[in-house]
Amino acid sequence: MDSRFVFFSAQDGAVLVSVDSREVGRAGDTETLAGILCSNAITSGYCSSSIDFCEEEGFAPGAAGEMIQKALECFE
């Protein structure tokens, strides 16, 4: 079982991906985010409230969460 803590947050129009409190990448589009997830074998994670309120970080409402969901679909 994978015991890593994966965390997604939104900042300045990008989704940040952290593993065990270390940033492993940031992406402004789904394709780049999917690449980060694949290269780090990430299949799930937790979201910061900045994902829920991503419009405060330069996204359209709900867009950051949708981007994460679409990127994770590459594992289905």
Image (spheres, grey):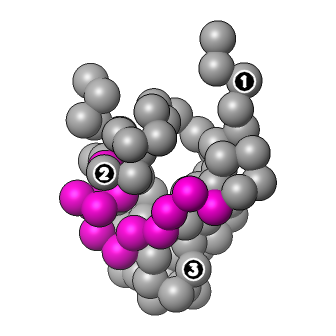
Quadrant including the N terminus:
top right
The question of residue 27 being in magenta is answered with: yes
Residue placed at 38% from the left, 43% from the top?
Answer: 39
Q: Residue at x 39, y 69 (%)?
A: 27
- Mark sitting earlier along the chain (3/1): 1
Residue 35 is marked as 2
Sequence order check, earlier mark of 3 and 2: 3
Residue 71 is situated, as x and y percent measured from the top left of the image, at 31, 47
The part of the chain drawn in magenta is 23-34
Q: Mark 1 points at which residue?
A: 3
Task: Measure the C-alpha gap from mark 3 to mark 2.
Answer: 19 Å
Instruction: Say which amino acid is labelled 3.
Output: Gln
Residue 75 located left or right of residue 53: left
Marks 3 and 2 close (CB-CB < 8 Å): no
Tell me where residue 22 appears, x and y as whole percent. Answer: 71, 57
Looking at the rendered image, the quarter that the C terminus falls into is top left
Which residue: 44% across, 83% down?
13
Q: In this view, does 20 lie to the left or right of 64?
A: right
